[in-house]
Image (spheres, rainbow, N blue to C red):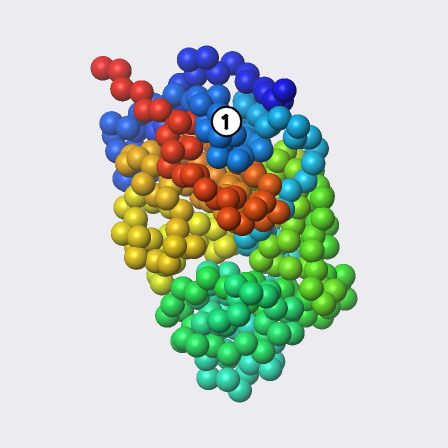
Amino acid sequence: MNHVLLIGLLGLVLQLPAARADGGGDPGRGQWALDCEAAAQYSRGTRGIAVLVVLHGSIVCEDYADGIDPDQSWELASAVKSFTAVIAAAAVQDGLITLDETVADTITEWQDDPRRSQITVRQLLAQTSGLASRNDDVRIPGYRAAIRTRARHEPGAAFIYSARHFQAFGEFMRRKLEAVGLDATPAHYLTRRVLAPGGIELGSWGAIDGMPVMSEAVEITPRNWARFGELVLREGVAGGVSLVDRDALAASFEPGQANPVYGLSWWLPDHERAYLLRRAPRHFLLDTIEYGEGLPALRVAAGAGRQRLYLMPELDMLVVRMTRGVTADPATREARWSDTDFLTRLLTRVPASE
């Protein structure tokens, strides 16, 4: 039997502001109805195991496939990349780093390289550092291997989806923490500074060469992933305490120049920028960009197996969709899934009243 929780959703209508403060938005877009059961049914039919919807800080929908324990953790795959932006925002608040500092000031091996000497923290998290390797899809490098990677492009010139940016960021943070006498493990820093105060527990965090993988390898329960999303949606505030630098966290959601549908470790799907994604390699794509014009902007942490954390700030809502992730059969784990189909089942536009 599915574990299903639906709270007061019959006839629930969500109201968006008519226009944004910056003058953007569609004055006629107005209202959407929320249908959790339709979305959960679609997810289950495409090998999903869990769907949670959090609205105004409360769970309004929680659905698990048959035989799934709500307390079981699942691997997030590349959705873990979103953790790095939170690590950076906490480190900015602590005065350890700035987003625009030159990484070579800390990773001194890069100082004599004309390209790597110019890479900033912001460019690592935006995946525009220029670091790349043809072997990225085969084996994730350890920190030491990542910082030995040559830059194939000028920093900021090209978006290259690669674990090496994040592993290099891991080494950068390791050295920053070590220099001030703190536990130098980036995962421990995130847990101490943000996750534990935010009530967020991880099932596990995989390591290479004894250091946590910054691009993937975290296991978490659906509810804990929702708590992480809620913390980000609240701009890093938990229990009335700001756990990160808000401006640094907000930078995660600024469209990049090399790839406007990616910020700092977060995807920013938007129908207005869809043409750029259509021209990108398939594994960069999120088809949420086409789920409907005029609907709320999305911020997405996405991983293999169609793991999804969708943030919708204008609705004050987040959605978790989980599967068995990278442990599923690679040949079938993503078959038939569509972000567009899922979200259009969850949100249905309601004609504005006169």
Q: Is residue 157 above or below residue 31?
A: below
Q: Residues within 10 Å of mark 1 (few under 14, many from 20)?
A: many
Does residue 172 appear to the left or right of 279 in the view shown? right
Q: Quadrant of the N terminus?
A: top right
| Quadrant housing residue 72 | top right
Foreground residue, 110 or 280? 280
Q: Is residue 330 above or below residue 65?
A: below
Image coords of residue 201 (percent x, y): 70, 41
Foreground residue, 273 or 29? 273
Image coords of residue 221 (percent x, y): 66, 38
Residue at 55%, 16% in the rendered image: 7
Image coords of residue 193 (percent x, y): 69, 50
Name the residue tied to disc 1: 40
Foreground residue, 217 or 95? 217
Residue at 37%, 58% in the rendered image: 281
Q: Quadrant of the C terminus?
A: top left
Image coords of residue 350 (percent x, y): 31, 20
> Which residue ends up furthest to the bottom in the rendered image?
112
Residue at 59%, 36% in the rendered image: 226
Residue at 55%, 81% in the rendered image: 110
Q: Is residue 298 above or below residue 342?
A: below
Q: Secondary structure at mark 1?
A: helix
Does residue 292 appear to the left or right of 10 in the view shown? left
Circle 1: residue type = Ala
Residue 256 shows in this picture: yes
| Quadrant housing residue 325 | top right
